[in-house]
Amino acid sequence: MIDTRAIRYRGQDTPDGFLFELSGGALPLEFANTISERSKGGRERLPDYGALIRWTTQAGMLTEQQVAKLEAASSENPGEAGRAHQEAIDLRELIFESAKAAAGRSPLAERVVGRWNAWLERVQSSRRLAAGHQGLEWQDTSDFETLDSISLAVARASIELFVDGDKRARTRICAAADCDWVFLDNSRRMNRIWCDMTVCGNRAKATRHYRRKTGK
Ligand SMILES: [Zn+2]
């Protein structure tokens, strides 16, 4: 089995499908990075529901059984799968907008907050309480049986990330001008500036070197 944590260079195409780079440090931010070069129209890595299942599997959220169930549900119901895919893409852009605001320490627009509240309602209604060892506990294990369950799980993780002051303060957008990948800076000195040293860090280093040599 391939260790997807070791995939760099913005992922790679293989005969078995795309391998995603998971370097965002938090699930919602990794989800936001399933598109590159947004400002130039974007290189979409989630073209359909099947790709969404593939990302979720590589992110370690789905068992083989759950994958099989979701694949069956999406081929039985292509219309619903299409809607669930579009909803996931809309959620991804909401995450990106919120991460960008967190990274820039800027306030969120009311419209954005409203959309998170709509997600919160759906997330809450999908949660159940169970009898734990010492009393009531949240029973959060999603069975991933419905086509919208991937988005619900990502939305829940996103809400937890964005309400956490420490994590919000560690949310960054890559320092490269034409890169909009986002990540959680888990470094002790909180000084990580590149989404990926092998891509944007090296490119910046090469540009500096070129400028030094040519004086441009
Ligand atoms: Zn970058």
Image (cartoon, grey):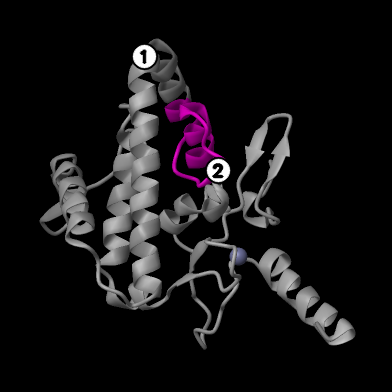
Of all residues shown, which one is farthest toward the right? 213
**Is residue 64 shown in magenta?**
yes
Rendered residue at 33%/26% (across/down): 83
Q: Which residue is mark 2?
A: 58
- Mark seen at residue 77: 1
Disc 1 marks a residue whose amino acid type is: Asn
Q: Quadrant of ligand 1?
A: bottom right
The location of residue 5, given as percent across then percent down, is 62, 55
The single residue placed furthest to the left in the displayed view is 135
Q: Please, which residue is most extreme toward the top here? A: 76
Q: Which residues are magenta?
A: 43-67
Q: Number of numbered discs present?
A: 2
Please identify the quadrant where the N terminus is shown: top right
Q: Is 83 above or below relative to 117?
A: above
Q: Evaluate if marks 2 and 1 touch, with contact meaning CB atoms under 8 Å apart.
A: no
Alpha-carbon neighbours of circle 2 within 10 Å: few (<14), some, or many (≥20)? some
Alpha carbon separation for disc pair 2 and 1: 23 Å
Residue at the location (58% across, 62% down)? Answer: 179
Question: Which badge, 2 or 1, is on the more N-terminal residue?
Answer: 2
Using the image, determine if residue 59 lies above or below residue 48. Answer: below
- Residue 32 is situated, as x and y percent measured from the top left of the image, at 45, 53
Q: Is residue 143 left or right of residue 31?
A: left
